[in-house]
């Protein structure tokens, strides 16, 4: 698995397809978060955007190999393992990006209501929930479950929106305390995101083994 992860990471970096989602995320945070504003609201804004970014990154990693190269990788390592490595690469890249963004926002924001360390911990936990939720959205809206590019992109955008606004969504549960100015450590939301992500990835890996 380590070799597969290195291979997928190298493909992602060389393809430069990661530039679109991650640069747009940087612009989104840079424009939407002002230095000196209350830290919790700024963190809520910052982590919410990780849902579509994570879903987009998963879509990129699952679609970055040419069909012939994908067939070779599948023959060498197995379709499910290759599929899982691509998903884990996207998730790890988004987690790293989200952690950097949360720490930067924590440093630049105003901490009158909460100290920097608790704010950073709450932000990192919420970011993890949002990335895992976005990962679930990403694997459910791309190949092999949805192959048509147009329908895949439409489902990804709609799924990301629903993940942010639907009652019971782990992402919404993690973001809500930050938006309302409350330091929250949403462990139930994290557990829900882990279960949702694992179920979605498991279904996607099984579908890859069956249909591709």
Image (cartoon, rainbow, N blue to C red):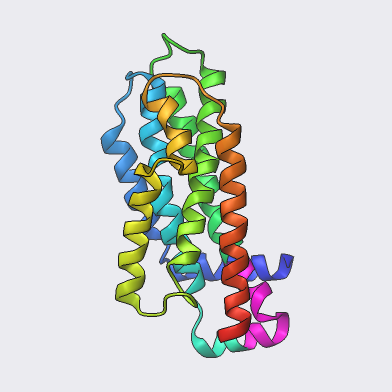
Q: Residue furthest bottom?
A: 68
Q: Based on the displayed image, in which of its 4 quarters is residue 19 positioned?
A: bottom left
In this picture, residue 142 sits left or right of residue 38:
right
Q: Residue at x 71, y 80 (%)?
A: 77
166 to 17, vertically: above or below: above
24 to 110, vertically: above or below: below
Q: Based on the displayed image, in which of its 4 quarters is residue 86 positioned?
A: bottom right
**Total numbered circles:** 0
Q: Residue furthest front?
A: 167
190 to 56, vertically: above or below: above
Magenta highlight range = 72-86
Q: Main secondary structure of the magenta part?
A: helix
Q: Is residue 58 magenta?
A: no
Q: Residue 103, percent across and down?
A: 50, 31
Q: Based on the displayed image, in which of its 4 quarters is residue 39 positioned?
A: top left
Q: Would residue 92 be visible to someone looking at this image?
A: no
Q: Residue at x 54, y 34 (%)?
A: 124
Q: Residue 203, percent across and down?
A: 59, 68
Q: Is residue 78 magenta?
A: yes
Q: Residue 92, percent across and down?
A: 58, 53
Q: Residue at x 71, y 69 (%)?
A: 3
Q: Residue 47, percent across and down?
A: 43, 38
In this picture, residue 38 sits left or right of residue 191:
left
Q: Would residue 10 be visible to someone looking at this image?
A: yes
Q: Residue at x 37, y 62 (%)?
A: 156
Quadrant in which the C terminus appears: bottom right
Q: Nearer the viewer, residue 24 or 83?
A: 83
């Amino acid at each position: 698995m380590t070799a597969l992860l290195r291979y997928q990471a190298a493909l992602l970096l060389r393809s430069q397809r990661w530039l679109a989602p991650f640069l747009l995320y940087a612009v989104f945070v840079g424009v939407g978060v002002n230095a000196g504003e209350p830290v919790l609201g700024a963190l809520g804004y910052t982590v919410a955007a990780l849902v579509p970014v994570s879903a987009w990154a998963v879509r990129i990693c699952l679609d970055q190999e040419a069909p012939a190269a994908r067939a070779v990788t599948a023959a060498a390592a197995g379709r499910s393992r290759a599929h899982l490595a691509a998903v884990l690469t996207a998730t790890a890249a988004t987690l790293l990006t989200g952690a950097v963004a949360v720490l930067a926002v924590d440093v630049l924001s105003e901490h009158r209501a909460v100290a920097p360390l608790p704010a950073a911990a709450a932000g990192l936990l919420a970011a993890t929930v949002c990335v895992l939720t976005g990962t679930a959205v990403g694997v459910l809206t791309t190949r092999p479950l949805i192959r048509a590019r147009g329908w895949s992109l439409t489902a990804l955008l709609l799924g990301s929106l629903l993940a942010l606004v639907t009652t019971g969504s782990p992402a919404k549960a993690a973001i809500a305390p930050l938006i309302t100015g409350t330091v929250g450590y949403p462990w139930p939301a994290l557990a829900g995101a882990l279960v949702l992500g694992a179920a979605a990835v498991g279904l996607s890996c099984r579908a890859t083994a069956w249909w591709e």
